[in-house]
Image (spheres, rainbow, N blue to C red):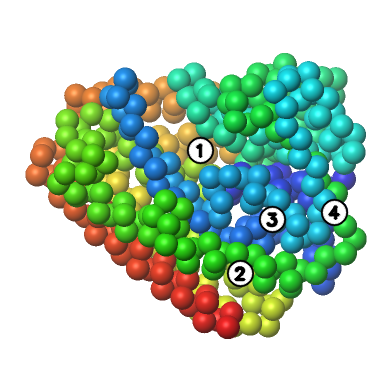
Amino acid sequence: MEAAYGGKHSVTAVLRNALTRQCLRDPRTGQALSEAMILGIGGGLGAGYILWEFEKYDSALIVLGFRNRWNYTPDFLKNACQRLNVAVDMRETASAKKAQANLDDALAASGTALLWADKASLPYQGLPASQKGHIIHLIGLSAGDDDAYIVDDLSERPWSLSQAELALAREPIPSNKQRSMSLTPSASLDLASAIRAGIDDHISHLSRSSESFSLPVYRKWAKLMTHPKNKKSWRTVFARRAGLYLTLRTIYEGIALDDTEGAGLRELYADFLLEAQAILDVALDRAAECYRACAVEWRALAEMALSDDLPVFAETKALMRARYAAFAGQDQARLAGAMKDLAALEAANNLDGWPLDGSATDALFERMSQQLHTIFETERSALEALKQAMQ
């Protein structure tokens, strides 16, 4: 079984690595499929923005969705596997004992499994206990020595979890249903058809009028940045500025660091289009350039949210980058230190220590609103370029 670990986005990386270990190959080259190819075949990109308010804690967090069906990962995985001619055995249960039996069956059948976990309950993640029960996270598993499991989770080297640690990480989120999945690739793979199906899904998904799960969500978000009365307007939600520091931090982190290649998966999708171009014999380079332009605009929004002009924002970004680098390098001491320092910055700035005055804060909201309008138009142009190329 070929070793394969790490990647950019947990869902596409874990699926790609599991299929590589099970010897799924590009029939033309004999090489393993790239993570970009898995993203594209699964349906490509998505769009999503949710502002969660936690009045009890005077805080609000942003959830950003960048992948097709980001809000329901099982559908993305099933679609990708169907197009790749990979049989899926997905099992769910409310029983911890049955969940363990399901995992044992999956590992016995194929040697590898995909598993839904609570991210903050994975000890190597180093996340605070306050986040337990809130973040659904996909990992890959193989059997290890004794009662340990080998874990594939966005690091070039695998992690290790005991059976007890894994059981605790599966329990906190009821909607996970202690879900596990095993995969059985077929010897037959029509890669060109799989790519076309994925692109068709991408186009259909992002052509919808939904203001929750398609491109119009960015136009809606832009309006909510500055709306004078809407209860979800940033001027309303952050009238006292409480929680604003952490919200801006989650925007930067969600675009640039957390489960992304650095630009909301737009660069990774552009990579897919260039790979697909050679296989389909369709000119997709222009569409790829357009999605790289989207990546530029998303990076600009991330930097706008935490501008280097403010020392506290520059320090925040440096610590977050250090935290993710420590995770990738499995340096648990450095990771813990970065998280401790980030917690101190949050305590000093998230409630009473907001560093900007009223006019400067309003100006920030205006700039972000304008940038979101630019993102919306750039995303629409990229989608149109892809539609034209595929006609």
**x, y (%) of residue 265?**
52, 56
| Amino acid type at image mark 2 | Asp
Which mark lies nearer to you, 4 or 2? 2
Is residue 28 visible to the viewer in this orientation of the structure? Answer: yes
Q: CA distance from mark 4 to mark 3?
A: 14 Å
User: Crowding near pointer 1: few (<14 within 10 Å), some, many (20+)?
Assistant: some
Say which residue label 2 marks: 200
Dot 4 or dot 2, earlier in sequence: 4
Displayed quadrant of residue 142: top right
Q: Is residue 180 above or below residue 184?
A: above
Classify mark 3: helix, strand or loop: helix
Which amino acid type is shown beneath numbered disc 4? Pro
- Crowd around label 3: few <14 · some 14–19 · many ≥20 (10 Å): many
SS assignment at label 4: strand
**Residue visible at 42% across and 22% down?**
340
- Secondary element under disc 2, as helix, strand or loop, is helix
The residue that label 4 is drawn on is 185
* Residue topped by disc 3: 79
> Residue 133: where, in percent of width, then height?
53, 24
- Check the image and name the residue furthest to the front: 209
The reply to whether dot 4 and dot 2 touch (C-beta < 8 Å) is no
Question: Disc 3 or disc 1, which is closer to the eye?
Answer: 3
Residue at 47% x, 67% y is 207
Q: Could you tell me how far apart the alpha carbons at marks 1 and 4 are, in whole angstroms?
A: 33 Å
Which comes sooner in the sequence, label 3 or label 1? 3
The amino acid marked with disc number 3 is Asn
Q: Which badge, 2 or 3, is on the more N-terminal residue?
A: 3
